[in-house]
């Protein structure tokens, strides 16, 4: 009985050559530009391939679907944000939250047009939205930033409460991003003013956290968030 030998390919894995990396980058950037211009639903993969001047087969080699493009988009933005957030200085959690928000807006700023086009997907798509199973990797990466904003603060509350508060701040940051996407003020200055206002409001809230009733409210609100949005 003879066993057929499979000829192994030598060299780098497919798609990791400098040419492959460059081709993937060009296709990705074209897809993101078209989604930002035409919207997620209206953009087709053939249009993306045509914009770069390659065959649809080459495009599918790197991105088998529009979903793959969106997941790459989430991955790149969340990774950049998590990396930038590591530089947040020590201090009180309310100040660290404001810095985290401004850092977030800096990272998302160049991609605002694309994010506006993706808003219906982010909110309403069960597979590609913010709280979908496919996008959990990105959500957890960003959520960890806000857990650390509180947990690493000089005035961090007890661990269980710290985690609940961090998760609620993560949710608050999503609300600020939605405000930012809708903000019609010049250079979205109203959003930056909102972040400054939230920091001042959180001064009073941090004092209120000394009350058992308020701490109970935070834990109960966190339980509702986990059940409704995270399915836990």
Image (tube, helix red, strand yellow):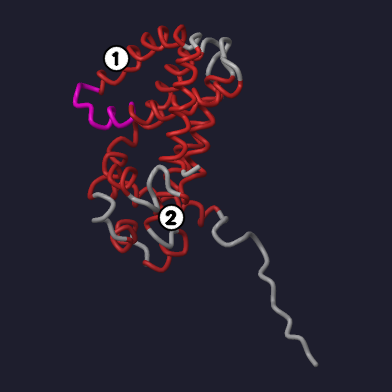
Rendered residue at 41%/40% (across/down): 228
Q: In this view, does 43 lie above or below 224?
A: below
Q: How far from the left and from the top, in percent, is residue 30? A: 34, 51
Mark closer to the observer (1, 2): 1
Few, some or many residues within 10 Å of mark 2 (<14, 14–19, 20+): some
Rendered residue at 28%/45% (across/down): 120
Residue tagged 1: 193
| Viewer-nearest residue: 150 or 111 | 150
Tell me, yes or no, whether the highlighted magenta stretch contains residue 184: yes
How far apart are the two marked residues, 1 and 2, measured between alpha carbons?
A: 35 Å
SS state under label 2: helix
| Viewer-nearest residue: 13 or 158 | 158
Rendered residue at 44%/21% (across/down): 217
Q: Is residue 81 toward the left or the right of residue 42 in the image?
A: right
| One can see residue 84 in this view | no
Tell me, yes or no, whether the highlighted magenta stretch contains residue 180: yes
| One can see residue 82 in this view | yes
User: Magenta span covers which residues?
Assistant: 176-187
Q: Is residue 205 toward the left or the right of residue 184 in the image?
A: right
Count of labels in the image? 2
Q: Is residue 105 above or below residue 30?
A: above
SS state under label 1: helix
Q: How far from the left and from the top, in percent, is residue 27? A: 39, 54
Few, some or many residues within 10 Å of mark 1 (<14, 14–19, 20+): few
Tag shown at residue 47: none
Residue tagged 2: 68
Rendered residue at 47%/59% (across/down): 62
Q: Is residue 115 toward the left or the right of residue 219 in the image?
A: left
């Amino acid at each position: 009985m003879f066993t057929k030998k499979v000829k192994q390919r030598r060299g780098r894995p497919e798609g990791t050559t400098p040419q492959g990396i460059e081709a993937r980058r060009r296709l990705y950037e074209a897809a993101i530009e078209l989604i930002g211009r035409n919207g997620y639903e209206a953009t087709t993969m053939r249009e993306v391939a045509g914009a770069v001047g390659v065959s649809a087969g080459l495009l599918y080699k790197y991105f088998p679907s529009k979903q793959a493009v969106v997941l790459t988009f989430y991955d790149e933005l969340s990774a950049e944000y998590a990396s930038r957030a590591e530089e947040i200085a020590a201090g009180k959690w309310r100040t660290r939250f404001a810095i985290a928000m401004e850092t977030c807006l800096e990272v998302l700023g160049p991609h605002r047009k694309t994010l506006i086009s993706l808003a219906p997907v982010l909110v309403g798509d069960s597979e590609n939205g913010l709280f979908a199973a496919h996008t959990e990797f990105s959500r957890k990466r960003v959520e960890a930033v806000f857990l650390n904003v509180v947990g690493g603060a000089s005035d961090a509350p007890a661990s269980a409460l710290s985690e609940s508060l961090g998760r609620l701040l993560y949710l608050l940051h999503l609300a600020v991003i939605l405000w930012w996407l809708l903000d019609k003020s010049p250079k979205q200055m109203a959003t930056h003013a909102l972040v400054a206002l939230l920091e001042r409001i959180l001064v009073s809230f941090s004092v209120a956290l000394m009350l058992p009733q308020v701490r109970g409210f935070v834990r109960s609100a966190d339980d509702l968030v986990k059940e409704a949005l995270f399915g836990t």
